[in-house]
Image (spheres, grey):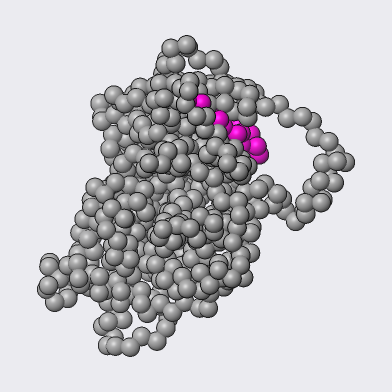
Amino acid sequence: MTSLEDDDLRQRVHGLLEVVAPPVAPVDAIIRRGRGIRMRRAGVAVGGLGLAAIIAALVLTPPAAPRPPAPPAPLPATETAGPGGVFARGVADGHAWRLAVQNIADPGYRCIPAITVNGTDADPVVPSTGHYADMALGPAAPGIGFAFLQLPADVRQVVLDGQESLPATTAAVCGLRYRVVGFAFRLAHPPQITVVARPGWPKLRATAGGAPPDGPPVYQLPPVSSEPPVPDTSSQTDGIWTNVGPPGAETAQGVIASGPTWSITLLFDAGGDCYNFGAPLSPGNPEVGTCGPISTPDGPETIVALPLSYPPGLHNAATGYAVQVSPATAHLRATASDGSTQLVTPRVVDGRRYTAFVIGKSLRLTRLTWLNAAGREIASTTALPQYGYTQFQP
Amino acid sequence: MSDPLDELAAPDVISGGGEDFSAFVVSRWPGLVRLAFGLTGDRWAAEDLAQATLARAYVAWRRVSRADDPDAYLCRILVNTSNRRFRRHRVAEQAGDPPDTAVEGPADLVGERAALLAALRQLPPRQRAVVVLRYWEDLTDAQIAVTLGCSPGTVRSQLSRALAKLRENPVLGEGEPG
């Protein structure tokens, strides 16, 4: 087939898009929306309350002084990561946490370096100075954010809010060396970060405020939110890192399940394990895409639901499911509400194992069962999502 | 040479809102909606995506207005916003209809447009973005890489895969060779 060459495709794409006739630009609506984003970033958009009401509420009801997240435990003087690649740890509001660099590929496959929280929820990134990422775990650690910052070799430490000093630590995995600091912080109060270079070098500061006149460079932590996904582009999904800075690791993708009229594909990158369930030959060409946290071989597995209708069941459509499974899993058995079962075999995508299947319309997924190579049951759960994702430790 | 930590630079505190920004919106709106339509395949989603993009530009107006290439900046915001929407829980609506504006020409041209739209929608989001940025925005591999935050090699491989899939489409493959 030779007809779809560059010029031809360019002509076709132009033919498709040039006939789109946009309405008059909604300038006022755009400005209102922009102001809304700015308000959320400033942390003052709380329901319908005005600023005065918020201040009044604070005056009338003085909140208990929040206990700041415990600082990361002091690291060895050698500034090298501890066992398991752990480069920061602490306890925040009673929740123990640790940040580490580790390989998230299954044994025997190409090493995939990533930074993890508590051994899971990975961010596959390569060493890169100036790369920052943060995330929230939602109900697993309410109100707490986690962040790491990759630093140049000449930076010795960073200081949070002018108080906590965190040494830059070198951690190695997959033959790569990461120069990082990590910390936990209150989502409502992202800390000011001061980056301290070698003696004699200028100090660089990061702050949530604006740049002082003639002052040093000023940085601001991007906003992070643990709100559930809503039709709003300023929040993020629990368990998925928001990366800022140089490009991260390369992506991998593949079809992890398919049928005569449908397929479920995986796109794996720093944005999470992202799945797309499409039925291009069905009426209306339905399609759904969503992302979940990246699991690790030893960590909890992420079960992602991909309903072709929303709210689920509204149009009585099928639901796709995708699960990243551990190396010990030889098969996954899916049981539907009519008692029927499917035995699904994992497919390997870039050294990680995934299963996917479809539950037909009018049915619900009622149980997932993990089986090892001998066919013996490893684990089973009935806590299954109809949309979004849940995590489960087999 | 800029400091690598400049990547963490703060969002602009000063926002736009004056006549400059309004004029900017009016001038860029049609192009952004068309680009967004190429990425989403859905007219309403495209208008919403274009709005979200310009709202973000409003927040960062100081930076946008001073950028060497504001259009490249906008393009990056739009593509990233589109990808972020895909990454959060999102259920795509039914495949977007072709624009319901009057379309001149033989019926098979309309059919071709519908086929291309459907074929684009079947591509994974990143492949779709690469195709649209290459053939609508006429960006180079390097420019697309910057926009998508990946390497030029990834752009080439994504484009290659996308073209292979598009060539499999029976309608798109029926045209005159070369």
Q: Nearer the viewer, residue A365 or B89?
A: B89
**What residue is rendered at 43% in x and 12% in y?**
A78
Q: Nearer the viewer, residue A58 or B109?
A: A58
Q: Report the number of discs.
A: 0
Q: Quadrant of residue A162?
A: top right
When the figure is inspected, residue A21 is found, relative to residue A297, above or below; the finding is: below
When the figure is inspected, residue A218 is found, relative to residue A64, above or below; the finding is: below
Determine if the magenta segment contains residue A193: yes
When the figure is inspected, residue A234 is found, relative to residue B38, above or below; the finding is: above
Residue A385 location in percent, x, y? 51, 45
**What residue is rendered at 20% in x and 63% in y?**
B168
Q: In the image, A211: left or right of B129?
A: right
Q: Is there any visible trace of residue A272 in the rendered image?
A: no
**What residue is rendered at 26% in x and 30% in y?**
A110
**What residue is rendered at 12% in x and 72% in y?**
B178
Residue B62 location in percent, x, y? 54, 56
The span shown in magenta is A181-197
Q: Which quadrant holds the C terminus of chain A?
A: top left
